[in-house]
Image (tube, rainbow, N blue to C red):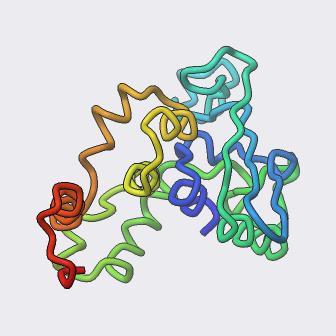
Amino acid sequence: MGFYAVMYFAGLRPSEAVGLGKADCFLPEKGWGVLTLHDTHPVSGKQWTDSGERHDKRGLKSREAKEDRPVLIPPPLAAGLRAHLKEFGTAKDGRLLTNERGGLVGTSSYWRVWQEARPYAFPPPKMHVLAKKPYDGRATCITDWLRSGLPVAEVARRAGTSPEVIGRHYAGLIDNSEEEENKKIERTMGWASPDAE
């Protein structure tokens, strides 16, 4: 739950989520919390890393090598992560999210669980088009930020990317929003009748 939640509520990339440590989390009882990201752990394969591990350790995308990225998180995610810590604790190295052996959550594991859970969360016909891959949680978060009216530059800052990437990849991911957008235009242009709301 915690792995998917940080993508859906905070817009983290999977490679950012797997290395998140307890020390990186400010999880208040009330109000918004903060996750401070320091690095990523992309899956490269043992033969491609200097360490011989499947996950490489790198700096944050679009950042200087040692630059951190604070990510504001809403109260439901802070509460969910507190519950996660209470139930599961952390790995030996302080990481919040682990596999069953205490290691980094692998791509094959989170893909398998995602595919098993999708039919329960998205019954037909929506299952064919929604949440096809775990990364779609991040895309949904970013799209929701855009729909809430946040400026593109602020969405980009929170997501750790550029405004150009937001415009190119995420702005068009809103599901069934044409009717809502049409109503906004009608209200702005004065075309909506008072009882249409």
Question: In the image shown, does 85 or 108 lie closer to the viewer?
Answer: 85
Residue 163 relative to residue 34: left or right: left
Left or right, 128 with respect to 121, comes to left
- In the picture, measured across the screen, residue 119 lies left or right of residue 179, that is right
Q: Quadrant of the C terminus?
A: bottom left
Position in image of residue 84 (x %, y %): 75, 70
Taking the spot 55% from the left edge, 21% from the top edge, the residue there is 62
Give the vertical position of 87 relative to 189 (above or below). below
- Work out whether residue 176 can be spotted: no
Examine the rendered structure and indicate whether residue 116 appears above or below residue 54.
below
Residue shown at 62% from the left, 35% from the top: 41
Q: Furthest-top residue in view? A: 64
Residue 131 picture quarter: bottom left
Residue 80, percent from left and from top: 70, 71
Instruction: Classify 181 as above or below 103.
Output: below
Q: Considering the image in quadrants, where does the N terminus appear?
A: bottom right
Residue 182 is situated, as x and y percent measured from the top left of the image, at 15, 61
- At a point 71% along the width and 39% down the height, the residue shown is 70
The residue closer to the viewer here, 53 or 61, is 61
Relative placement, left or right, of 165 versus 69 is: left
Residue 141 appears in view: yes
